[in-house]
Amino acid sequence: MKDAVHSEAEVRDLIDGFTRSLSGPDPSEAAGQLSRRCFIKFAAGAGGGLFFGIGSPTVTQAQPATTAAPAFVPGAYVRIAPDGKITLYAKNPEIGQGVKTAFGLILAEELDANWSDVNIEQSPIDASVYGVQMAGGSLSIPTNWMVLRQAGAGARAMLVAAAATRWGVPPSEITTNESMLLHSASNRRAGYGALASEAAALPVPDLQTLKLKERKAFKLLGKRHKGVDGLKIVTGQPLFGIDVQLPEMLVAVFQKCPAIYGKVGSANLDAVRRLPGVKDAFIVEGTGKPTEVSNGVAIVAKNTWSAISARRKLEVIWDESGASRDSWKGFSTQARELGKKLEGAQIVQAIGNVDEALATGRQVESFYTYGFVGHAQLEPQTSTAWYKKESSGDSIEIWAASQTPTNARNLLATVFGIPAGRVTIHQQRLGGGFGRRLVNDNVIEAAQISKQAGGLPVKLVSLREDDMAHDFFRPAGFMAFKGSLNDRGRIAAWNSHLVHFKSEGGAAVTAANWQANEFPALNVPRYRASQTLMPLRVPTGSWRAPGANTAGWVVQSFMHELSTAAKRDHVEFLLEVTGARHAGNTGTPPGRPVHVPERATAVIRAAAERSGWGKNSLPQGRALGIAFHFSHQGHFAEVAEVSVDAKKKITVHKVWVVGDIGPIVDLSSAENQCQGCVIDAISTMSLEITMENGRIEQKNFDQYPLGRMPITPVVDVHFLDTDYPPTGVGEPAFPPVAPAICNAVFTLTGQRIRTLPITREGYSI
Amino acid sequence: MAIDLDVNGKVYKADVDLESPLLWVLRDELKLVGTKFGCGVGQCSACTVHLNGVPVPSCQLPVAATQGQKITTIEGLAAGNVLTAVQRAWIDHDVAQCGYCQAGQIMSATALLQQFPQPTDAQIDEFMSRNLCRCGTYTRIRAAIKSAAGTAIATRGVNQ
């Protein structure tokens, strides 16, 4: 690899560019001069020190944030100042899943930094330096594990090389520990800061020659740590999108039609403009896409209360000629009819002759329904935008709590017709995401309102009613199952017909599609999955473990119906079905990844053992239920211990969660995610979003009662801590919870819950 | 209308609409953004402050009603750099996921422990059920409250 030392002028440019990027205009603009392809590092100003990044932006001045084929180019992650201060940059949005801390831990581990001296900061948003920055799909850790380890190890290697040069000893004789370099033979030591400037002047090592730590040498990873923003959170310091404050900032609210796709017919704008504190009120035409800008009335005021107060006096006549007329009653009636057919309109997967096998043996049929649910992240969506009209070309500066800031930047560029290089996103901490903020509608709307307000800085606040009404909901579904068992109590055939939704283009709506290789497609001798789609105009979107959060429930519930009909122990039945692919189904199937049999059976066995399945006698009136699901690369088996009272109130006393996600990064955060998934799943079992005449019926939390502290079971979390590559944990612990609970309820009462929300069957949590 | 507010032991002068909920005066006028907005209808308690030591949802409290009263927000709990036992317990137990509800949780928990210094599980659940946590950190909130109360849980990390 060629020498990558820069000239003094280049170094100055790089520092200036990077320093500017942290607080001001767009970094890719500032970095436009770079063209190197290898490691870069540069001294930090007159005081020296080491900045460490891998790779180099190959960017020209006007480059759009996504290049045609964005080869992932990792950027600057580590900064070591001469005084020893270490700053690590976390590139992905922090939504409560703990990646800001986790990314810092991975860097610090390979760097061999003293964790208590490390400061973690949110990185700039710049695709040319960091690649895609997003929080979703439980992908942060698996995608960035190696990149971060290389960044940390590379910085460490250069510090070692600098010490070797200074001390005149071979690098192999130097060890590192807790931000210190040590040559034990001569008893010399130095802090990282002392060697940082010298390290910055050395040639950069080839990434491929870096020696990464073995797992047994980890000092930080796998242990319980504390979230790096903990102090700020408990003392109420500004962190979230809604906390952004700018000088001269205005606050806006945006009233959209209660029925999606409705438009403003007329509004009392003049009267609203005269209300106290109001600066302006205007119609926003919208782009026609709810993912961008909807149609509605914006009120821009000097502060939040003036805006809210004025909105209460806003009167709008809506033109609903093109608006949604979606009706939950209509959907469920129609779906029940459609679901009577064994085979739906579209075959998703067909293996073997299902009909023949369904006609023989012990047959089981069931119809399951799950409703729409909303995201209800506790921080209502809030973005602050400053659309700047300049003679040299418009630019946009945004302070957003987005799960997809890279996408937000590109979308702003597209919608407003300006180069992405003139769009700056300052990523804020999210008060919850759950998939809602994968969609950047609030960001785009804030920019549009800022523009129409005359290019003033505007904070667009959503009220809870806005978030409830204009969500991208988890889609509902209606699943008709039929299965048959052979004379040995094994599944002979499995048929599923899912009635759900299509958008106007005819494709299944977002997050609704049934996967062709959905379990147990590859694990039974004959399998058919089909779907029939009903038109839906209410927007849908990814909701924690999209697809899996309902597939897990229906499949694992029906699986229990089958084992019950076969009079077999359910754990034994599950192990058999998950434990082997059916003879013909070898190789890698298309679609999402499927579970690895030995990893599945390992978590099932561990969950059974830890819960005392089949062994311990339970108190009177309690039963256990178990379920397994593989999603987001995580294998999870969970057991729930429940009781049910005379009024059908379900108490979940305890849940055992066993997961295999490979090595754990931050054990405390990983446990917190699993505890959170359990509580989320119990809460969501009793919730639904319904619509009539295109209007969402649940307006606020009094009508959408999220679970509170009393529903909380004891949660026992156990990770198998295997040697596979690490995968994420924000989502995969969610899907097994509801079926485990419903299976326990059946075991206890003989009543099978086939509706979510369970309240529709008279149950409560 | 110009009013004086006693917040965290300091007198602030603000020019406000008297009907404005205290929540928005704190956030927008006093720039104290630790108190959060979650629902605006008194359902989530993310906006909890103390009014003369009593926990109240500030989204439901017109600022006019707070004149002459002592208001305490999350920013006013710690004395200088010294965190309260509740705040320390929140950090020790790594309670937060997204963190958005936690200021309100801490304000409620602080009031709970003032009323019930050694609360039972039932008292904790009942008192704290006013506060929503969408991320589901109730397990850890219970544990942090018990630690702060001095009745620490036996094992850390499992079954909490």
Image (spheres, helix red, strand yellow):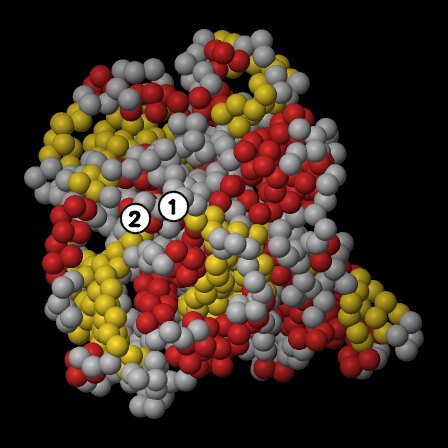
Q: Would you place residue B46 above or below residue A370 in this image?
A: above
Q: Residue at x 43, y 45 (%)?
A: A645
Q: Secondary structure at mark 2?
A: helix
- Residue at image mark 1: A648
Mark 1 belongs to chain: A
Q: CA distance from mark 2 to mark 1?
A: 9 Å
Which quarter of the rendered picture does the C terminus of chain A lie within? top left
User: What quarter of the picture does the N terminus of chain A occupy?
Assistant: bottom right
Q: Chain of mark 2?
A: A
Residue at horizontal 60 percent and vertical 33 percent from the top: B123
Tally the marks. 2
**What's the amino acid at mark 2?**
Glu
- Tell me if I can see residue B103 in this picture: no
Q: Report the residue that reaches farthest toward the bottom.
A: A583
What's under tag 1, amino acid-wise?
A: Lys
In the image shown, does A595 or A362 lie closer to the viewer?
A362
Residue behind mark 2 = A761
Secondary structure, mark 1, is: loop
Pinpoint residue A563: horizontal percent, then vertical percent: 37, 72
Mark 2 near mark 1, Cβ–Cβ under 8 Å? yes
Within 10 Å of disc 2 (Cα), the crowding (few <14, some 14-19, many 20+) is: few
Q: Residue at x 24, y 50 (%)?
A: A539
Residue placed most toward the observer, A213 or A570: A570
Q: Is residue A16 above or below residue A201?
A: above
Q: Earlier in the sequence, mark 2 or mark 1?
A: 1
Can you tell which quarter of the image residue A54 is in? bottom right
Give the vertical position of A119 relative to A221 (above or below). Answer: above
